[in-house]
Amino acid sequence: MIVLKFGGTSVGTADSIKKVCGIIKSAKEPYVVVSAVSGVTDKLIEAAECAKAGKDVRATLNEIRSKHTCIMYSLDLDKTLLDAELEALKGALHEISNLKELNLKARDTILSFGERMSSKLISEYLRASGLASKHYTGWDAGIVTDSEFTKANYLEASFENIQKRMSKLDHIPVITGFIAKNKNNEITTLGRGGSDTTAALIGAGVGASEIQIWSDVNGVMTSDPRICKEAKTLDVLSFQEAAELAYFGAKILHPQTIQPAMKKQIPVVVKNTFNPKHPGTRVVHKKGKRNAVTGIAVKKSITEYTIESGRMLNACGFLSRIFNVFNENKVSVDMVATSEVSVSLTVDEAPHNMKDVLAELSKIGNVTSKHNHSIICIVGDGITDNPKLKGEIINTIASNDIHIKMISQGASSINIGLVVDDKDAEKAVLALHKRFIENN
Ligand code: ASP
Ligand code: MG
C-alpha cells in the first residue's frame, strides 16, 4: 500500500490530472489524497470574506465554478458532477451574508468545499479511465480532530478509525486532504497545507509502506534555489532534518506531516508530478549519520528582543516568567540565548499580540529590540557533535565580514542557528553552501 498525495498544482488543470491518473495507474495498491484545485482555497477565503462584508459573491463563486467546469469539460466528464457541492457552497455563503458574521467554524465549512470538489472530480476521472474508485471525505476515512477550527489537531482515535474503514478496499480511494470533523460532527481543517498531514495520517492508519507527496518540484533542496543557484535536490533526509528545514523556510513538506509518519517509521518521498522519473527526496526515520551539513534554510524578517534584568536573572523562575508571557499571548519564539544578565530571543516580524507581550515584558526587565534580522539554520544529523565543523561555520561567516548577532545550537544535535542582519543573509547562505555543500 502506498499513499499518493497530490497538491493543488498537480490537480490544477485537465492536463495535470491526466498525469496524476497515469501515476496512480502505475502505483501498487494506491491510496490517493488530494488538495483543492490550485487557487481554489484562496478563492473560497475571498468568497467568505465577501459574504461577511455583505458584498456580492456571485463573481467569485462563478470563478470557482468555471475553474472546475473547464477541467470537467476537458476531461469529458459530466458537467453536473459538482452541482450539489456548488449549491451547498452557495447556501453556506448566503448564511454568512445574512448573519454578516464569519466565525472560524463557518470559515472551515466554506474551505472544505475545495477538497470535496477536487476529490469527487478526480475519482470520477479515474472511473472514466477504467479504474474502480470512490471518493471519501477526511471524516468518511476516519479522521477526527479537536475543535481548533482553521488549525485543528487530529485525535489518536483517527488511526484506529482509518484502519477499520480503509483497510482492504476493492477500489482506489480518493480522499480529501486538509479537512476533517470534530467529535460534534462539525467540519474542521488541519491548517493551510494540511493535506500532507492527511496523507501521513492515512499512511499511518492503513500501515502504508511509503507516503508520496507529489507537487511541482523535484524534492527538498539543499537551500532556497532563489537565493542559491547551486542548490540541489537531496536524495535522502532524516525526518528530523526535514522538520528543521521545513520550519525555517523550505516549505515543501508541512512539518506536521512528519509526525504520524515518523511514529510509524514510514518513509515520505517528495516527488514531481511534472517530472515523475526524477527519484525525488526520500525522508526516512533514520539515515546514516554523516556529521556533515545537509541543508541551509533561512527565515528572513525576524526581530530579536533582549530582556535585561541584572536583578532577576539569578532568581528562580525568571525564564519561565518570560516564556509565560509569550505563551499566554500565543506568540511563538524561534531562537533563545541567555547570558548572566539577559535573555535574547527571536520572533516573527510583527505577530499581532506583540504589543501586549512587550507591555508585560517591560514589567520584568528592560526590553530592547533589533529588527530586520534573519535566522540562518544549518541542518545536518550530528553536526553539533562535530566541534571542528562548528568552528568552520563561524570562520566562514566571519571571513565574509558578516556579524553574527546571536547563535544557538539546537536542543537536538542537528541544527545550528545564527542570527544575522537581513542584508547579510543571502551572502551568508551562499558562503555556507559553497563551503559545506558544493565543496564537500
Ligand atoms: N487546499 C489547502 C490549502 O491550500 C490544503 C492543501 O493544499 O494542503 O492550504
Ligand atoms: Mg501543500
Image (tube, grey):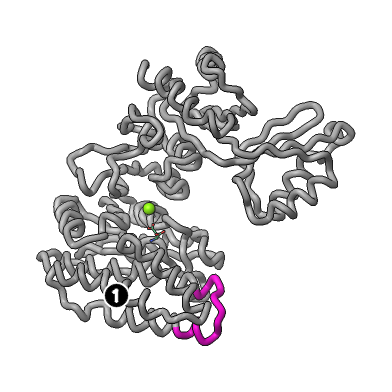
Is 335 contained in the magenta span? no
The mark total stands at 1
| SS state under label 1 | helix
Depth check: give the residue in front, 344 or 129. 344
Of the residues shown, which amino acid type is indicated by label 1?
Arg
Residue drawn at (45%, 30%) of the image: 296
**Residue bearing mark 1:** 65
Depth check: give the residue in front, 414 or 82. 82
Furthest toward the front, the residue is: 423
With 359 as the anchor, is 177 left or right in this view? Answer: left
Furthest toward the right, the residue is: 311
Bin the neighbour count of mark 1 within 10 Å (Cα to Cα): few under 14, some 14-19, many 20 and up: some
Residue drawn at (34%, 30%) of the image: 229
With 255 as the anchor, is 86 left or right in this view? Answer: left
The majority secondary structure of the magenta stretch comes to: helix
Q: Quadrant of the C terminus?
A: top left
Residue drawn at (86%, 31%) of the image: 310
Q: Is residue 62 visible?
A: yes
**Quarter where residue 134 is shown:** bottom left
Q: Is residue 366 above or below residue 408?
A: below
**Quarter where residue 329 is shown:** bottom right
Per the rendered image, the range of residues in magenta is: 94-106
